[in-house]
Amino acid sequence: MIKPKVLFICSGNSCRTQMAEGFLRQLGGERFQPFSAGADVTAELDPDAVSAMREIGIDISHQQPKKLDPFMRERMSYVVTLCEREIERTCPIFPGAIWRLKWPIEDPALAKDPETHWRKVCQARDELQQRITEFIQANS
């Protein structure tokens, strides 16, 4: 059975896309090949993203931010951009996609203080869980 490749992209690949990859890996089982990448990759995962996912029983601490470049030569079944509508123009464009989905989810990195950042990470996590669950149901 050929598993659909799903690539989640945004600019930094440290939080939203990493959580999305973790959710699809956990909730989708062996049905999908999840990946995440970004154009301006950060050095490490957002610690709040790791904590927020651990809070619900998913460990993404082993994942690493990845640049989009190596994926540009691959064919993906789905490419899901997580950039917000207001800053979508800075989100990477991926030409090798069969289907493109846009899930504009607020970037927690734009929060002005640690408490707001944590709240935004948890909001993004909860929205991603819902979207990934719906995605799996629609593609099963």
Image (cartoon, rainbow, N blue to C red):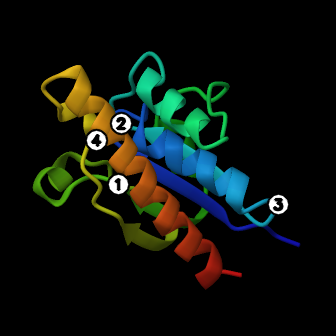
Residue 107 drawn at (x, y percent): 26, 42
Q: Are marks 1 and 3 in contact (CB under 8 Å)?
A: no
Image quadrant holding the C terminus, namely: bottom right
Q: Which residue is mark 1?
A: 82
Q: CA distance from mark 4 to mark 3?
A: 29 Å
Say whether residue 95 is visible: no
Which of discs 4 and 2 lies nearer the camera? The answer is: 4
Badge 2 amino acid: Ala
Image quadrant holding the N terminus, namely: bottom right
Category of crowding for the residue at label 2, using alpha-carbon neighbours closer than 10 angstroms: few (below 14), some (14–19), many (at least 20): some
Q: Are marks 4 and 3 in contact (CB under 8 Å)?
A: no
Q: Nearer the viewer, residue 115 or 2?
A: 115
Q: CA distance from mark 4 to mark 2?
A: 22 Å
Badge 3 amino acid: Glu
Q: Are marks 4 and 1 in contact (CB under 8 Å)?
A: no
Q: Of marks 4 and 2, which one's residue comes earlier in the chain?
A: 2
Q: Residue at x 63, y 73 (%)?
A: 136
Q: Which image quarter: residue 55?
A: top right
Q: Which residue is mark 3?
A: 30
Q: Which residue is mark 4?
A: 120
Q: Which residue is mark 2?
A: 39
Task: Determine the secondary structure under disc 4.
Answer: helix
Residue 112 drawn at (x, y percent): 12, 26
